[in-house]
Image (spheres, rainbow, N blue to C red):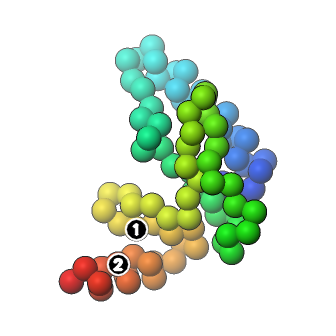
Amino acid sequence: MWSTGPAEMSVLVSALEVTDREAHPLGMTINWAKTKIQNLGDLDGANQTQQAAVLGNQVDVVELFTYLGSLIHCSSSSEPENKRRQHSS
């Protein structure tokens, strides 16, 4: 999930709460330790929230994360992934 500001963060938290509530009757749960919110609105890092509370669980707000083996950066640039691949070879 991603956020561009406080209003969007509130919507994302609500969406996670609804998803969790709807998943339980189906026998599914959200792995809160692996759930991340990507902050797209504050690329210089100022005023960036580090965590969001969702149903008593702390969800990390991050600039980058690994998804299906690729590094996803908040700038939408492939440069961090390219650098990661160059250094690993």
| Nearer to us in this view, 36 or 12 | 36
Kindly report the distance in space between the C-alpha atoms of the residues bearing marks 1 and 2: 8 Å
- Tell me the residue that label 2 is attached to: 84
Furthest-left residue in view?
A: 89
* Image quadrant assignment for residue 17: top right
Seen at 39% across and 61% down, the residue is 66
- Badge 1, how many Cα within 10 Å: few under 14, some, many 20+? some
> Taking 58 as reference, is 72 left or right?
left
| Residue 47 percent coordinates (x, y) | 75, 63
Question: In the image, what residue occupies the spot 47% across and 37% down?
Answer: 32
Residue type (three-letter) at the residue carrying disc 2? Arg
**Identity, as a three-letter code, of the amino acid under mark 1:** Leu
Check contact, mark 1 vs mark 2: CB within 8 A.
yes
- The residue at which mark 1 appears reads as 71
Mark 1 or 2, nearer chain start: 1
Q: Does residue 50 appear in the picture of this structure?
A: yes
SS of the residue at dot 2?
helix
For the question of whether residue 16 can be seen, the reply is no
Q: Residue drawn 52% across and 26% down?
A: 20
Q: Is residue 57 left or right of residue 86?
A: right
Of residue 58 and residue 12, the one placed in the foreground of this image is 58
Measured from the top left, where is residue 85 in percent x and y? 30, 79
Q: Quadrant of the C terminus?
A: bottom left
